[in-house]
C-alpha cells in the first residue's frame, strides 16, 4: 500500500486533532491488518486490458503499471486480450513476477517456444485452467508446441480452445490425463499430413473427462467415436446435433456407455424424446434443449421430474404443457424459456390449476403476453371460485385482474427467487404484473405480505 497520502500536512493535522496517541496506534494497526488481508484479495484476480494503454497513455497508466509490478505476486487469474504496447509491458511484468497463477487466458498466435505466453505457462506449473483464444482459424498456435507446453501442467483441469481438429483433441486428452473439462469453439478438419489422422482410433484408451462443450460448430467431429472413450462424462453441450449424431448419442446412452451423464445442452432443433427416454430414471440434473416437441417435455417430466434442477427450453411454444413444470419438479432451481412468442393470459391461468411444488426456484425467465381481456369462469376451479367472489365483493375487478392477483400470490411464495425476467408483450392492455416484476426481486420481497393478505379477499 502506498503511504504517500499520509504525508499530506492537512491530513496529519486532521488525524492529530481528532485522535489521541492510543487511537492513532489502533488506526495504524487496523491499516496494517487491512493491508495484509485485503490487499492479496484485491490482486488475486486481475485483467490486463489492452484498451487501457490506448485510453490512458498518461502518467496514470505509469502509476498503475508500478502498482501491478509491486503486487503481481498476488495475482491468481490472468486474462490477456489483444496485444498492444501497454499489454506487452504488463505481460513482461507478469513473466517476471507472477508465479502463483491458477488460470490464464491467452490471446496469442505463436509457433515459438520462447514466446512470453508459453514461458509464463511453463513458469506456473500449478495452473488449473488455460484458455487459448487465438483468433485465426488457420495457422494458429502450433499443435505440437501446445501439447508439449500443456504436458508439464499436471494439475490442469480446464482447457479452452478456439479451434481444434479431432486428432488434436485426442492428442490433448492423451497428453493431459488430469484434464476434466474441455471447451472447443469450432471443430475443424485436420490438415493433410498431420499426426494421427484417425484420432487414435486403434488406441482404446479411455479418458477421465467429465465435461465436454462445443460452443460453435461440431459438424466435423466424429462425436460417437469421441464419447465412447469418455465413460465418466457428466456434462455434454453441443451446438450442432444432426440426426446421425443424435441417434449415435442415444445408442451410447442405451448401451450404458455414458452412465454418469446428468447434464445435457443440445442447441439444434430436433426431437429428443428417444434420447431422454434412454436416460436412467431420475438421473438428469440439467436439460437445455432446442425443441418444439411436447413429447420431449412430457418424457422429461415423467422420468426426470424428481432430479431436474435446471431446465431451459428454446423454441418451445406449447405453454400449457410448460405449466406442468411448476407442478412436477420439486427440485427445480432454474427455469428458462426462450421463444419469440409468449404466454397468453389464458395460458397463465393454467399455472393456477394446482399448487406449485418448485418452491426452490432461484431463477425464472418466461415470456408472458398480456394482450387478452377477461378470462372465462371455467378456466380453472380456483379461478372460477375467485371470480364468483369477485362478482359479489369486487365487481370492479375483471377476470384478468383476478388471474394476475392469483398468479402473483403463487409467485410471491417463491422465497429463494433471486433472478427474475418476465418478457412482457405490450399489445392492448398491460397488467400491473409487469410493474411488480420489472423492478426485480426486491420489489417482490416488499410485496409478499401485502399480496398474501390481499389474496384472502378473493
Image (cartoon, rainbow, N blue to C red):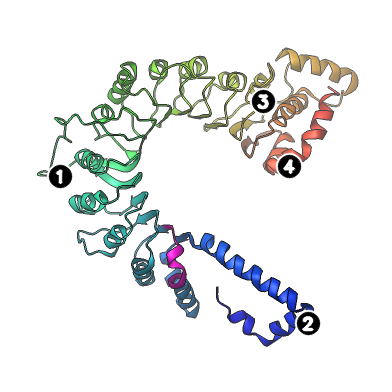
Residue at x 40%, y 20% (from the top left corner)? 271
Q: Are marks 2 and 1 in contact (CB under 8 Å)?
A: no
Name which of mark 4 and mark 1 comes first in the sequence: 1
Q: Dot 2 corresponds to which residue?
A: 17
Q: Which mark is residue 191?
A: 1
Of tags 3 and 2, which is closer to the observer? 2
| Secondary element type, mark 2 | helix
Q: Which residues are magenta?
A: 68-77
440 displayed left or right of 337: right
Q: Quadrant of residue 6?
A: bottom right
Name which of mark 4 and mark 2 comes first in the sequence: 2
Task: Please tell me whether residue 99 is drawn above or below residue 146 in the rendered image.
Answer: below
* Separation (CA) of disc 4 from disc 2: 45 Å
Residue 44, position as x, y percentages in the image: 48, 59
Name which of mark 2 and mark 1 comes first in the sequence: 2
Q: Is residue 58 magenta?
A: no
Amino acid at each position: 500500500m502506498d503511504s504517500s497520502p499520509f504525508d499530506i500536512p492537512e491530513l496529519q493535522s486532521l488525524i492529530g486533532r481528532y485522535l489521541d496517541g492510543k487511537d492513532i496506534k489502533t488506526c495504524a494497526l487496523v491499516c496494517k491488518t487491512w493491508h495484509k488481508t485485503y490487499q492479496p484479495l484485491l490482486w488475486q484476480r486481475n485483467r490486463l486490458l489492452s484498451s487501457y494503454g490506448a485510453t490512458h497513455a498518461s502518467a496514470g497508466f505509469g502509476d498503475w503499471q508500478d502498482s501491478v509490478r509491486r503486487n503481481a505476486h498476488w495475482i491468481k487469474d490472468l486474462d490477456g486480450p489483444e496485444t498492444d504496447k501497454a499489454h506487452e509491458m504488463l505481460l513482461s511484468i507478469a513473466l517476471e513476477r507472477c508465479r502463483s497463477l491458477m488460470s490464464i487466458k491467452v490471446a496469442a498466435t505463436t509457433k515459438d517456444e520462447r514466446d512470453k505466453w508459453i514461458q509464463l505457462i511453463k513458469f506456473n506449473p500449478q495452473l488449473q485452467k488455460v484458455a487459448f483464444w487465438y483468433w485465426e482459424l488457420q495457422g494458429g498456435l502450433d499443435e505440437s508446441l501446445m501439447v508439449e507446453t500443456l504436458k508439464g501442467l499436471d494439475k490442469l483441469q480446464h482447457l479452452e480452445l478456439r479451434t481444434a481438429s479431432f486428432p488434436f483433441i485426442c492428442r490433448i486428452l492423451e497428453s493431459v490425463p488430469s484434464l476434466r473439462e474441455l471447451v472447443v469453439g469450432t471443430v475443424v478438419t485436420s490438415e493433410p499430413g498431420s499426426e494421427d489422422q484417425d484420432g487414435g482410433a486403434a488406441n482404446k484408451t479411455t479418458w477421465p473427462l467429465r465435461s465436454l462443450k462445443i460452443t460453435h460448430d461440431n459438424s466435423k467431429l466424429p462425436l460417437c467415436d469421441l464419447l465412447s472413450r469418455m465413460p465418466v462424462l457428466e456434462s455434454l453441450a453441443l451446438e450442432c446435433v444432426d440426426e446421425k449424431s443424435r441417434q449415435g448419442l442415444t445408442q451410447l446412452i442405451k448401451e450404458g456407455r455414458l452412465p454418469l451423464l446428468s447434464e445435457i445442452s443440445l442447441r439444434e432443433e430436433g426431437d429428443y424424446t428417444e434420447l431422454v427416454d434412454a436416460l436412467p430414471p431420475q438421473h438428469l440434473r440439467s436439460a437445455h434443449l432446442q425443441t418444439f416437441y411436447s413429447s420431449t417435455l412430457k418424457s422429461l417430466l415423467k422420468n426426470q421430474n424428481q432430479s431436474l434442477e435446471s431446465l431451459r427450453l428454446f423454441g418451445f411454444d406449447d405453454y400449457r404443457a410448460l405449466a406442468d413444470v411448476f407442478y412436477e419438479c420439486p427440485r427445480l432451481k432454474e427455469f428458462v424459456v426462450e421463444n419469440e412468442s409468449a404466454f397468453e393470459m389464458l395460458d397463465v391461468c393454467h399455472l393456477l390449476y394446482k399448487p406449485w411444488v418448485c418452491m426452490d426456484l432461484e431463477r425464472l425467465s418466461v415470456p408472458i403476453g398480456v394482450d387478452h381481456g377477461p378470462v372465462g369462469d371455467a378456466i380453472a376451479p380456483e379461478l372460477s371460485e375467485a371470480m364468483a367472489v369477485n362478482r359479489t365483493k369486487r365487481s370492479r375487478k375483471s377476470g384478468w385482474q383476478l388471474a394476475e392477483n392469483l398468479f402473483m400470490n403463487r409467485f410471491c411464495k417463491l422465497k429463494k427467487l433471486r433472478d427474475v425476467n418476465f418478457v412482457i408483450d405490450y399489445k392492448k392492455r398491460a397488467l400491473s404484473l409487469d410493474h411488480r416484476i420489472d423492478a426485480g426481486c426486491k420489489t417482490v420481497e416488499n410485496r409478499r405480505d401485502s399480496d398474501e393478505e390481499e389474496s384472502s379477499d378473493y
